Amino acid sequence: MANKNKILVPSAREELDKLKARVMKDIGYNVDINNPDNVKYEIADELNIPLNKGYNGKITAENAGKIGGPIGGNMVKEMIRMAQEQLLKK
């Protein structure tokens, strides 16, 4: 499945993927460092939500949020923690 998210700085994609892998690994998910996007399948399986590689047009917005929410939410928490740490160093 192609990643269709548009990020503000396209060259940051690699670092965002590393952050995703590290954050999700830290909370106990089995993450492939080379393909951190696959963690969504592990989360979907955990929640008994059918998610397949490729087209998932029949998945509800609610279920998509249940899958993506923990990923994005934990990434944001980590970015906030990192920013606070940098502010304390100044």
Image (cartoon, rainbow, N blue to C red):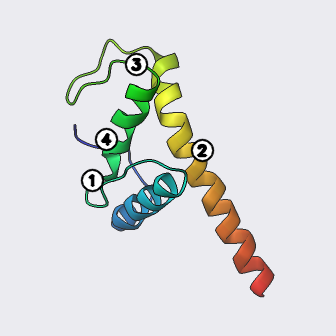
Query: Nearer the N terminus, badge 1 or badge 2?
Result: 1
Is mark 4 in CB contact (under 8 Å) with mark 2?
no
- Using a 10 Å C-alpha cutoff, classify the residue at mark 2 as few (fewer than 14 neighbours), some (14 to 19) or many (20 or more): few
Q: Amino acid at mark 3?
A: Ile
**Residue 39 in the image, given as x and y percentages of width and height:** 37, 43
Instruction: Tell me the crowding category of disc 3: few under 14, some 14 to 19, or many 20 or more residues within 10 angstroms, Cα based.
Output: some
Q: Earlier in the sequence, mark 4 or mark 3?
A: 4
Using the image as rendered, state which of residue 85 and residue 21 is in the foreground: 21
- Amino acid, disc 2: Gly
Report which residue position mark 4 lands on.
Answer: 4
Q: Secondary structure at mark 1?
A: loop
Q: CA distance from mark 2 to mark 3?
A: 19 Å
Specify which label sits upstream in the sequence, 1 or 4. 4
Kindly report the distance in space between the C-alpha atoms of the residues bearing marks 4 and 3.
Answer: 21 Å
- Badge 2 marks a residue whose secondary structure is helix
Q: Quadrant of the C terminus?
A: bottom right
Which amino acid is tagged 1? Answer: Asn
Q: Which residue is mark 1?
A: 35
Mark 4 vs mark 2: which is more N-terminal? 4
Residue 73 — which label? Answer: 2
Between marks 4 and 2 in the image, the one whose residue lies nearer the viewer: 2
**Picture coordinates of residue 27, whole percent (x, y):** 55, 51
How far is mark 1 from mark 3, CA to CA?
20 Å
Specify the label residue 7 is tagged with: none
Rate crowding at label 1 as few (under 14), some (14 to 19) or many (20 or more) other CA atoms within 10 Å.
Answer: few
At mark 3, the secondary structure is loop
Residue 33 coordinates in the image, percent (x, y): 31, 60
Residue 49 is marked as 3
